Image (cartoon, helix red, strand yellow):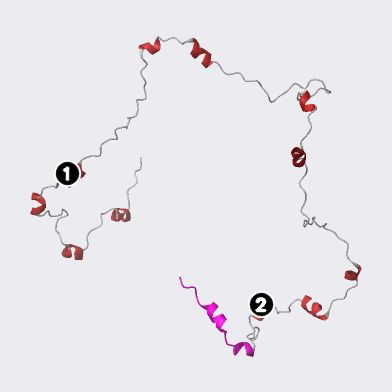
Amino acid sequence: MNLGFPSDRILKLAEPKKFQLAYLQKRARNSPEWPVTPAALTCEASQRVLDLAHPKSMHPDFIQAREAETHVTDTAKTARVSQRIKHLAQPQVRKDSWCYDRGHPEALIWPVSKSAQQATASSRTSELAKEKQVSPKYLPVRDAEWPVSKAAKHTAATPRTVGLSKPSKRPPMNIAQFNPDAFTVKESAKKAFCSSRILELARPIGR
């Protein structure tokens, strides 16, 4: 059986850390134990300290956890169930009102009384039975395809519209990055002064 031995590096790392010489010379105490003054050795605890030293008492209504094993008494073992308990132990039988016998096709699924068949709706019921009206300002959804007017078909774009529809012509970035005059600033922009409103908006919010 081959047993591995730790290397010199691991043995060096396993050594406890040693205190530095400067710390040993300047430390306040030679022993790790704190010195106790004679006044602390001969002092007497006050009544307040004695009261705080008492353990916290249990609440009067506290009930300890019951043991896992419950002992059954002899009377409970020999007890007999009464008729009332037997009656309560039986499951309650409920009539299934969700399903009805379909019967014949011409027969009614739900029985309707004669008074309900001859009943007349009141004015309030008739008012509530009306469908909800649409607002007079309601506009229906426009179709995806709608007819184009003749004026729109024969219209001509103005020179201003044609000029705005053309995309801006800029040189590609791989060429513009070597041109020092690619992005020029107007002379008027160089001599412009900020208005009082812009100076006010440029100030940071004081919080």
Q: Nearer the viewer, residue 28 or 161?
A: 161
The N terminus: image quadrant: top left
Which element is circle 2 on?
A: helix
Residue at horizontal 20%, vertical 63%? 23
Badge 1 is on which residue? 50
User: Which one is earlier in the sequence, the residue at label 1 or at label 2?
Assistant: 1
Residue type indicated by callout 1: Leu
Residue at horizontal 17%, vertical 65%? 26
Closer mark to the observer between disc 1 and disc 2: 1
**Label 1, label 2: how many angstroms apart (C-alpha)?**
85 Å
Badge 2 is on which residue? 174
Residue at horizontal 79%, vertical 20%? 103
In reply to whether residue 59 is colored magenta, the answer given is no
Residue 137 to residue 80: above or below: below
The C terminus: image quadrant: bottom left
Residue 154 — which label?
none
User: What residue span does the magenta drawing correspond to?
Assistant: 188-207
